[in-house]
């Protein structure tokens, strides 16, 4: 989680010029990055991870997680959403957060297309995906390279502004040996090769 948290904190910092609580956000998952003052709120600091997200118009979407505000399949969100929740998806989102989710989706290319249908034309998709496997998370079917993410995004009609890999050879080996970020210095974790 070291790289995930560092990346998400950098996103929040990079968009700090946006007025807090000014953007309509969707989080694919349980909503802990966009929700404030709830049991699901971001635990690494008070409040929520993305301060630009408006609590009243931001929602979480997941097909199976009972904590999600909207139950729908990201491969076809508009077609699969429950009729009682359809109104929540009728207005597009300024920001969509999809962190460590696509590896659990049977058809990631369809998920990219589904996310594109929910995003404003000038909206931002904040996406993280793994390169290595983690079998403890159940239904885990895909892994991604930088080039693979770019291709799927372009095929879904999304413009890739930046796509940055995190980690290095040392952390790949450490992951395979089941070591933790705490076993390394910040310099070792942040090195690029």
Image (cartoon, rainbow, N blue to C red):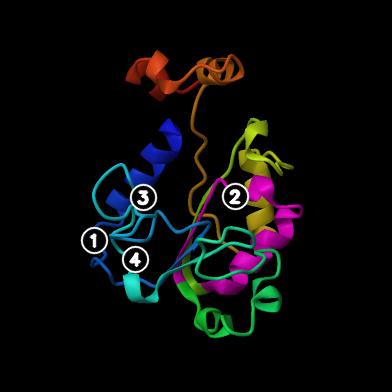
Q: Given this view, does label 3 or label 2 mark the residue nearer the observer? A: 2
Reading the image, the residue beneath label 1 is 17
**Image quadrant where residue 57 sits:** bottom left
Which of the marked residues, 4 or 2, is nearer the chain's N terminus? 4
Q: Given this view, does label 3 or label 4 mark the residue nearer the observer? A: 4
The correct choice, above or below, for 116 with respect to 42 in the image is: below
- Give the Cα separation between the discs numbered 3 and 4: 13 Å
Q: Position of residue 49 (x, y in %)?
A: 33, 52
| Other-residue count near label 4 (Cα within 10 Å), few / some / many at <14 / 14–19 / ≥20 | many
Reading the image, the residue beneath label 3 is 11
The reply to whether the C-beta atoms of the residues labelled 3 and 4 are less than 8 Å apart is no
- Give the Cα separation between the discs numbered 3 and 1: 11 Å
Q: Position of residue 83 (x, y in %)?
A: 63, 84
The correct choice, above or below, for 86 with respect to 146 in the image is: below
| Other-residue count near label 3 (Cα within 10 Å), few / some / many at <14 / 14–19 / ≥20 | some
Q: Residue at x 70, y 70 (%)?
A: 76
Residue 95 within the magenta-colored segment of the rendering: yes
Reading the image, the residue beneath label 2 is 101
The reply to whether the C-beta atoms of the residues labelled 3 and 2 are less than 8 Å apart is no
- Give the Cα separation between the discs numbered 4 and 2: 20 Å
Reading the image, the residue beneath label 4 is 53
Q: What residue range appears in magenta?
A: 94-119
Q: Describe the element under mark 4 as helix, strand or loop.
A: loop
Q: Given this view, does label 4 or label 1 mark the residue nearer the observer? A: 4
The correct choice, above or below, for 73 with respect to 139 in the image is: below
- Give the Cα separation between the discs numbered 3 and 2: 18 Å
- Give the Cα separation between the discs numbered 1 and 2: 27 Å
């Amino acid at each position: 989680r070291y790289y995930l948290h560092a990346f998400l904190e950098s996103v929040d910092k990079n968009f700090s010029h946006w007025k807090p609580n000014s953007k309509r956000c969707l989080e694919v998952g349980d909503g802990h990055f966009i929700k404030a003052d709830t049991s699901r709120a971001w635990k690494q600091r008070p409040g929520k991870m993305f301060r630009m997200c408006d609590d009243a118009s931001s929602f979480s979407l997941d097909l199976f997680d009972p904590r999600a505000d909207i139950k729908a399949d990201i491969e076809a969100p508009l077609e699969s959403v429950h009729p009682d929740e359809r109104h929540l998806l009728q207005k597009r989102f300024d920001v969509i957060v999809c962190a460590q989710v696509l590896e659990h989706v049977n058809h990631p290319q369809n998920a990219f297309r589904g996310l594109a249908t929910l995003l404003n034309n000038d909206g931002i998709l904040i996406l993280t995906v793994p390169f290595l496997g983690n079998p403890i998370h159940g239904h885990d079917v895909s892994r991604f390279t930088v080039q693979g993410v770019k291709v799927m995004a372009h095929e879904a009609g999304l413009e890739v502004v930046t796509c940055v890999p995190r980690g290095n050879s040392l952390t790949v080996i450490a992951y395979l040996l089941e070591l933790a970020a705490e076993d390394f210095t910040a310099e070792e974790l942040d090195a690029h090769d």
